Amino acid sequence: MKKHHPFALPLTAFVVATLALALASCKKSPDTIGNNLISNDDYFEIYKTDTVEVVCHSYLDSVSTGNVINVLLGSMNDPVFGGSEAGFYTQFRPSVAGQSFGNNPVLDSLVLQLSVTNYYGDTTVFQTVHAFELSDTLSVLSTYYNTSEVSTFGVDHANGYQFQPRPNTKMHIYGTDTVRQAVIRIPLSNELGNYLMSLDTTSYSRPDLFKEHFKGLRLYCDPVSYSGAICTIDPTNNTYTLLQLYYHAAATPEKPMRYDFYTTSSDAYFNSIEHDYSIGSQDFVSQLLDGHTELGKQQIYLQSMGGVKAKILFPNLTHWADTLEDSHIVINEAKLVFPASKLATDSIYKAPTNFFLLGFNADSTTFLLPDYFEGTNYFGGTYNSNSQSVTFRISEYVQEVIMGKRENCGLNLGINGAAYNAQRLVINGPESDVGGKLRLEVIYSIVNE
């Protein structure tokens, strides 16, 4: 009696498998890939399953955050993920070389203005920000992570300034300045302003010389007691992200002047994020902190900011062929579906747009899946707001595991831009009691010898 049980691939089916992979690389609609493998001939037996065993759990991670696209500032108290405080370290350079403030300059104010390009959370909650001068030097040649620390002096130049982010306000007037962009303006101490004015012209002659005297700032916010938001800042927007020094000559107070410092991609900066997961939900704490990975059957968690990723395993995948005798397997399509949990999104915690899926090697390093190279339209990874789910096609990867060309070490799921975005998502596990389940949907052909 012939046994029909997935998987295995071999000589007589090799041509068919090769054809399947070749067709997958063509610029066709994903829905048509593999269709020509399905025949009315009894030589092919076509099956579909969504009951492949899936084992998954979330785990804590860190991420390199040096000189990324955006820096982050703010604090959130998430009912599921707990507390997150985001800030950054950054260098500055003079806007004009050889600056001289003239005879008897008088400081009016020193303001750090930050261009806000996005936000995550509730921006109606007030934030308390701190700014400390660096006592150690940053370097663009160094690797910085969200957990990295650089020493600072003990004076808070922001003096615990409180602000309410207004990311949707695109017009501000500050004295004679009109700012046509959402910004956060943080007044800094006269002590720091007077110090910057006291530097001689030589100190302003080159960026490297200036950084010897002023190594930069560390910005961060206090934890909030509820809700809160994290703002996305464009650190190299030299039109709106500026350290602004306002001053006048003692003899002409009616003629105010301004000198700017700014950051470029040639300067060092990095995001620094602290998480207090202990105040998250009970299920989250149990899975992530207490090591109860079996809770991934019900839910898994993803968070950017060097926070949380997930590991996905298919423990029985390589055993599908064990009960086959003279038959072999061709994968027509394999889709990995991640349905969002009811805890996933609301008006405050919106679902991320894009996700990544990598393969794990035996040494826990990762690699790009072969399906990734077929392009985004085929591979997937974009959140679908209609189905409230994320789908990846991993047909070639599954076929390689079946053929023994890939070790079955699992997959790594995370949020794209985790080094510079503030986002999160809760996903239903493979045995979820509520809503759709995480699953691997496979259409395959049993090819008889």
Image (cartoon, rainbow, N blue to C red):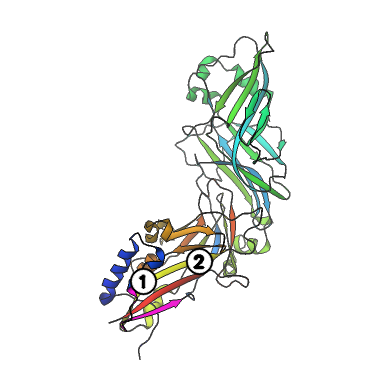
x and y percentages locating residue 234 in the rendered image: 55, 37
In reply to whether residue 42 is colored magenta, the answer given is yes
Q: Which residue is mark 1?
A: 35
Q: Quadrant of residue 156?
A: top right
Q: Earlier in the sequence, mark 1 or mark 2?
A: 1
Q: Residues within 10 Å of mark 2 (few under 14, many from 20)?
A: many
Which stretch is magenta? 37-50
In reply to whether residue 285 is colored magenta, the answer given is no
Q: Is residue 407 visible?
A: no
- Which mark, residue 337? 2
- As measured in the structure, the alpha-carbon distance from the residue carrying label 1 to the one carrying label 2 is 21 Å
Amino acid carrying label 1: it is Asn
x and y percentages locating residue 223 in the rendered image: 69, 46
Identify which residue is drawn at 36% across, 62% down.
Answer: 28
Identify which residue is drawn at 38% across, 65% down.
Answer: 397
Q: Secondary structure at mark 2?
A: strand
Identify which residue is drawn at 62% across, 73% down.
Answer: 433
Frontmost of labels 1 and 2 is 1
- Which residue is at the front of the view, 174 or 134? 174
- Which mark, residue 142? none
Amino acid carrying label 2: it is Val
Position of 329 with respect to 335 (left or right) is left
Can you say which quadrant of the picture contains the N terminus? bottom left
x and y percentages locating residue 49 in the rendered image: 46, 76
